[in-house]
Image (cartoon, rainbow, N blue to C red):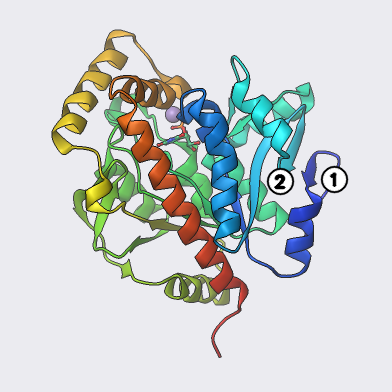
Amino acid sequence: MTYSSERVVVSERVAAALRAGAPVVALESTIITHGLPHPENVHAALEFERTVADSGAVPATIAVIDGVCRVGVDGGDLERLAESESPLKLSARDLPVALARGASGGTTVAATALLAVRAGIRVFATGGIGGVHRHASETFDESADLGILASCPVTVVSAGVKSILDIRATLERLETLSVTVLVYGSHQFPAFWLADSGIPVDFAVTSAGEVAAIMHARDALERESGILVANPLPLAAQLDPALHDRLLADALAAADAAAVSGKEMTPFLLDYMHTNTGGRSVEVNLEIVRGNCRLAAQIAAAYAAGPAA
Ligand code: PSU
Ligand code: MN
């Protein structure tokens, strides 16, 4: 069933696809407003939608525009959001405030997952989800993405989490929160720009159909928990590990020196990495999201075909 009100509006195209039981893939928008530099973000927003469409599913980019949650933002609004000077970063707890104030902003994985499920969308593609930050034992800085994934029956396709985070702690929290973790084509959890974080996981999957079968099994158990599908980029496409390690150390030191904290932390570290790799990390980032869009579309199609008899 599609959900629509003055506050949450599902676009005609997305609503029609959902009514027809056709595959739909949600896309987040904080990656556009805070995850990628301008002007690559403008092209990226439209390109991710095209990649999903070319792979056989209907894209539904989710964002808040003038106090309305849009499930399926139109191209003009998306460009306007990507070009805005100081856009808001809206996680789940920020949505009520943005709506009441008529504000616009990019929705994080947490906020996007909530709105996607509310609209009846079960598959979601992004670059990397948020997670547990380094030194979280002192700062308590853990993304709301993890808690929301625990309570939303959505399958998120991401390249794991970025190495700016504490990947091991993030996986521990995902276990505690009972989020199912699958790695596509490998037993090693990826580290976003790098194909392998060095941390093994229990379950590798090798096809979209296998993920869909796991989603249907979760439904049969009447569980409302999310599934994380980590999709490593091909080894040949990864960022040079030596460059990666050097930049990461510099980025963390810069964040420390600038006393960055809270919701500014993720955008600060990403921006540092992007501006100091001469665009190379942005290219890798874009390639990762394209791959995740393709896999998410295949999973959505397999899931829409229904449980195997
Ligand atoms: N990780 C990335 N790129 C991103 C984000 C995370 O590699 O753009 C964004 C996502 O929208 C994610 C959010 O949901 O940052 C997490 O922010 P926080 O850690 O403040 O919850
Ligand atoms: Mn945080």
Which residue is outermost to the right? 6
Look at label 2 and name its amino acid.
Answer: Val
Label placed on residue 71: 2
Asked whether residue 152 appears in the rendered view, the answer is: no
Are discs 1 and 2 less than 8 Å apart at CB? no
Quadrant showing the N terminus: bottom right
Ligand 2 is found in which quarter of the picture?
A: top left
**Residue at 40% over, 18% down:** 261
Q: Earlier in the sequence, mark 1 or mark 2?
A: 1
Q: Whole-Å distance between the Cαs marked 1 and 2?
A: 11 Å
- To which quarter of the image does residue 112 belong? top right
Q: Amino acid at mark 1?
A: Ser
Residue 180, quarter of picture? bottom left
Tell me which residue sits at (86%, 40%) in the image: 6
Query: Quadrant where the C terminus lies?
Result: bottom right
Residue at position x 35%, y 43% from top? 161
Kindly identify the residue that appears in the image at 66 percent across and 33 percent down.
Answer: 78
Disc 1 crowd rating (10 Å Cα; few below 14, some 14-19, many 20+) is few
Where residue 168 sits, quadrant-wise, is top left
Is 226 placed left or right of 7 in the picture?
A: left
**Residue occupied by mark 1:** 5
